[in-house]
Image: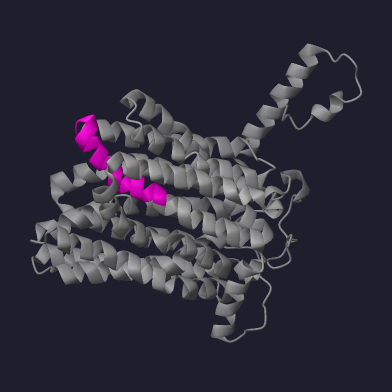
């Protein structure tokens, strides 16, 4: 029953029910206690605190940036330019960011990435406060932060394996996801109040402060020692990162899966969802309830991942991402709002469990000195189709109608979630049991990893 001590009952013909219940209670108590195990490590506490700070600012920043662009006289086209300026440099720099994360100290990469964003946003605040800000300047600021994020993301994901022992990676990822989603739930509302009360410049300023404070915490986090590998040419490192994805059939298949599911979900949820809320549900209020339900599902999924470590990683990722089809199908069928709200909960929970399992799987399976590059190529493959999906969604709605387009997105997600399971390598993907990982961290680069 998942107790971890149930083996004590094997061989008994008629176990005492009370004893069985006691074993189950001990098992769950041990799981709950183990959920906080990564917090015993100072490096992880500082890493978690730094990312919590950063998330509280980053959750506010897009709203503040949008209002800042509108405040200085920009229209929808100007706002689109600013938002695109934050995405395009990030996509372009991701492969380079992965190489840098593998070649340099990851904590140092995170520090300088945060400082670059802090400087760019502080400059934007000064321009807004002086009344001299222009849309192109906000676009440059967004571009600097986007490019810095391309270096930060692979370094931060790889750094988790440097601040906690191998057996606690899954739990550490779940704790980070819980903190991120909690910040997502609370920060936008607080940001809206801050923007309304003091203006968008103050909200951007808060984000700059959180970046600077996070950099200070990352600088103190420390890490396990990393073995020094021979320094290859930069282009050779780029090719090696691509090879790490290509030589693992399961990884390439799952990246392709995410490249289909992610854009379909974002187009349906972020673009068509508000349109459905306006046309059918009656406005932003009911759609806000739907968004809140999805956020609650994300938080619930992170909590579940803290106490549940599924062994079937491939099946779990496919099932979790496939759950995203459920609310889109409900919208396409025009089922009442309470059913849609209920559908958002398992969708959010399934997605979050899948993301935690996926992060843990890559940390286990990819050699330590190639993890940053592999993560960057994986992220790039998943993200590149998103702008294309955004551009195609509008014409698709005009041609097929809103409900048919949403139904097609749900069908695409379902198909993409199921197809990888036809590959035996995907079905065989498992996470190593926590108790097999060892109680103490091995030197960086010497952690046993599976091919």
Residue ranking furthest to the front: 399
Q: Does the magenta stretch include residue 273?
A: yes
Residue ranking furthest to the bottom: 233
* Left or right side of 328 for 120: left
Q: Position of residue 213 (x, y in %)?
A: 38, 58
The secondary structure that most of the magenta stretch takes on is helix
**Which of 235/243 is in front?**
243
Q: Quadrant of the C terminus?
A: bottom right
* Left or right side of 67 for 406: right
Q: Where is residue 215 in the image (x, y as percent from the top left)?
A: 42, 63
* Left or right side of 119 for 435: right
Q: Is residue 413 visible?
A: yes
Q: Is residue 162 visible?
A: no
- Residue at figure coordinates x 34%, y 50% from the top left: 267
Q: Is residue 319 magenta?
A: no
- Residue at figure coordinates x 20%, y 36% from the top left: 279
**Coloring basis for residues:** one colour
Q: In this view, does 14 lie above or below 106?
A: above
Q: In this view, does 408 lie above or below 237?
A: above
Q: Where is residue 376 in the image (x, y as percent from the top left)?
A: 51, 67
Q: Where is residue 82 in the image (x, y as percent from the top left)?
A: 23, 64
Magenta residues? 264-284
* Left or right side of 254 for 310: right
Counting every numbered tag in the picture gives 0
**Which of 233/283 is in front?**
283
**Quarter of the rendering containing residue 145:** bottom left
Q: In which quarter of the image is the N terminus?
A: top right
- Residue at figure coordinates x 22%, y 57% from the top left: 65
**Which of 23/416 is in front?**
416
């Amino acid at each position: 029953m998942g107790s971890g001590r149930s083996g004590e009952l094997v061989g008994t013909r008629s176990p005492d029910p009370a004893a069985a219940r006691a074993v189950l209670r001990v098992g769950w108590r041990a799981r709950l206690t183990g959920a906080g195990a990564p917090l015993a490590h100072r490096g992880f506490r500082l890493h978690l605190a730094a990312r919590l700070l950063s998330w509280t600012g980053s959750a506010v920043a897009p709203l503040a940036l949008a209002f800042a662009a509108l405040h200085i006289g920009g229209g929808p086209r100007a706002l689109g330019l600013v938002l695109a300026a934050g995405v395009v440099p990030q996509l372009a720099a991701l492969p380079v960011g992965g190489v840098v994360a593998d070649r340099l100290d990851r904590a140092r990469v995170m520090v300088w990435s945060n400082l670059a964003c802090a400087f760019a946003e502080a400059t934007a605040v000064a321009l807004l406060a002086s009344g001299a800000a222009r849309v192109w300047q906000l676009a440059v600021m967004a571009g600097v932060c986007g490019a810095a994020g391309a270096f930060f993301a692979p370094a931060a994901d790889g750094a988790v394996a440097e601040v906690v022992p191998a057996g606690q990676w899954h739990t550490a990822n779940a704790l980070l996801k819980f903190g991120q989603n909690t910040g997502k739930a609370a920060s936008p509302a607080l940001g809206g109040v801050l923007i309304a009360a003091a203006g968008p410049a103050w909200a951007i300023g808060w984000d700059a402060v959180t970046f600077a404070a996070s950099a200070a915490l990352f600088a103190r986090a420390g890490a396990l020692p990393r073995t020094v590998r021979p320094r290859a040419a930069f282009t050779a490192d780029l090719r090696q990162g691509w090879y790490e994805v290509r030589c693992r059939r399961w990884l390439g298949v799952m990246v392709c899966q995410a490249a289909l599911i992610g854009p379909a979900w974002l187009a349906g949820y972020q673009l068509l969802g508000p349109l459905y809320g306006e046309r059918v549900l009656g406005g932003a209020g009911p759609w806000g309830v739907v968004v809140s339900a999805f956020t609650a599902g994300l938080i619930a999924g992170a909590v579940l991942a803290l106490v549940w470590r599924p062994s079937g990683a491939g099946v779990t990722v496919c099932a979790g991402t496939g759950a995203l089809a459920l609310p889109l199908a409900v919208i396409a069928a025009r089922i009442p709002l309470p059913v849609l709200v209920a559908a958002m909960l398992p969708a959010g929970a399934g997605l979050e469990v899948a993301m935690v399992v996926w992060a843990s799987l890559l940390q286990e399976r990819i050699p330590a000195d190639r993890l940053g590059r592999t993560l960057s190529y994986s992220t790039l493959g998943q993200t590149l189709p998103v702008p294309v999906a955004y551009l195609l969604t509008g014409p698709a709605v005009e041609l097929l109608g809103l409900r048919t387009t949403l139904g097609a997105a749900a069908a695409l997600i379902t198909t993409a979630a199921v197809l990888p399971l036809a590959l035996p390598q995907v079905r065989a993907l498992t996470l190593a049991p926590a108790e097999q990982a060892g109680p103490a961290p091995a030197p960086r680069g010497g952690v046993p990893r599976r091919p």
